[in-house]
Image: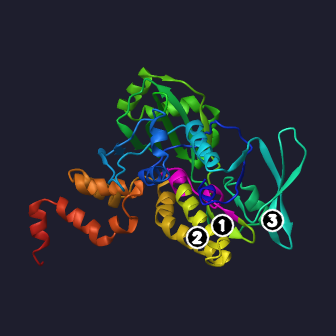
Amino acid sequence: MLLARKGYRVLLVDRATFPSDSMRLHYIHQAGIVRLKRWGLLERLIATNCPPIRERVIDYGDFPLTGRAAPLDGVADAYAPRRYVLDKLLVDAACEASAELREQFSVDALEMDDGQVVGIRGRSAGGAPIVERARIVVGADGMHSTVAQSVGASMYRVGPALACYYASCWSGVPTVGLEIYWREGKVIFVFPTNDARTSIAVAWPHRMFHQVRADVEGAVMAARELVSELAARVRAGRREEPFVGTADLPSFFRTPYGPGWALVGDAGYHKDPYLAQGISDAWRDAELLAEAIDAGLGGRQPLDGALAEYERRRNEEVLPLYELNCRLASLDPPSPEQLRLRAALRNNPDDAERYFGVNAGTVPFQEFFAPDNLARIIRQAAPASARSAEAIPT
């Protein structure tokens, strides 16, 4: 869409047809919603009756920490659209910008010329093999990217799968917004989506996947019973769809470019969905990559240099939350430091808003978690007598 809007001829191929659904979690933080607004697509999303999400509840078994994320560029709400809504919206916008779409098209291989990618070989459903040539091929084709595997894109910062997930949608389960509950090494995520339904996902340690898969419904029911108030709400509702799940969730970065090719989204780097950063990150990287391709093909700088800068900026943006995500996806009990910070934020709505804003992409990680800022929050939460005692030399 972005490249087509810049005037480039773009061929978009996908094995799917649109609209189509996906089991992937679909929560979009404000940082992603800001891009939809900038692209002129937010009103289209709102028109699908996807409910806005403003309130957040995070409960580690100590108490529910509630609040809102700091807004960004006038955007205060997150959204969690179904993928059959979101993907169709984006595909339509790309086609309106003059991109050519071929659905049910499978890419068999990349076309190479002296070590450079110059196009693709593939076929539409029931069609004969064809070759399409291009100055650059972008793989936006997921963590098992055909493009990445074909060019041997190198991987780094590789980590194992830490958690497994199962999710479904319920009707008749009210929610205040985004709710996250940690209990006994399990995490439950609850949020509203299209069609007046509530999405509920449960995460378990990766080692439990085969046990959970043997009785998914029983495992989900057992997890929800750890939060009695949530369990009562879910029992009053009705599950409307089958459970879907996965344990195939490694963490890694890939070198996202080379002669005639580039990677974006999960093809370029992948992580556990714990912090729900996937779509927001993919959209940010789409903007960065479109800028780099335009700078290179437009002759403003060498394409290799522009793509190298794309990788540098991607990594700089994502690394702090990537590392935090890996820690949280282990599903370990909260540390004493985490619990102390949560307690300090309990009656501090201003700093709680900034705390929620870190995950929402509206507050820089390094800014909020700077040692001086954390010390200030803890100090302000301490009783006056304790603050006085701290000031007395011993």
Could you tell whether 80 is left or right of 104 in the image? left
Please name the amino acid that badge 3 sits on.
Answer: Val
Q: Are marks 2 and 1 in contact (CB under 8 Å)?
A: yes
- Taking the image as shown, residue 166 lies to the left or right of residue 261, namely left
Callout 1: SS: loop
How many numbered tags mark residues here?
Answer: 3
Image position, residue 211 (x, y; %): 62, 38
Q: Is residue 344 visible?
A: no
Q: Residues within 10 Å of mark 2 (few under 14, many from 20)?
A: many
Q: CA distance from mark 2 to mark 3?
A: 21 Å
Please determine whether, in this image, residue 306 is positioned above or below residue 8.
below
Mark before the other along the chain sequence, 2 or 3: 3
On the image, the x and y values in percent for residue 89 come to 57, 41
- The residue that label 3 is drawn on is 118
Q: Residue at x 37, y 50 (%)?
A: 75
Closest to the observer, 340 or 30: 30
Residue in the image at 61% along x and 53% along y:
1
Provide the residue designation for mark 2: 310
Q: Secondary structure at mark 3?
A: strand
Look at the picture and state if 84 lies above or below 390: above
Magenta part of the chain: 262-281
Give the mark toward the camera: 2 or 3.
Answer: 3
Q: Identify residue type, mark 2.
A: Tyr
Quadrant location of residue 219? top right
| Disc 3 residue crowd, few under 14, some 14–19, many 20+, Cα 10 Å | some
2 vs 1, front mark = 2
In terms of depth relative to the viewer, which is nearer, 95 or 379?
Answer: 95
User: Nearer the viewer's eye, disc 1 or disc 3?
Assistant: 3
The dot on residue 256 is 1
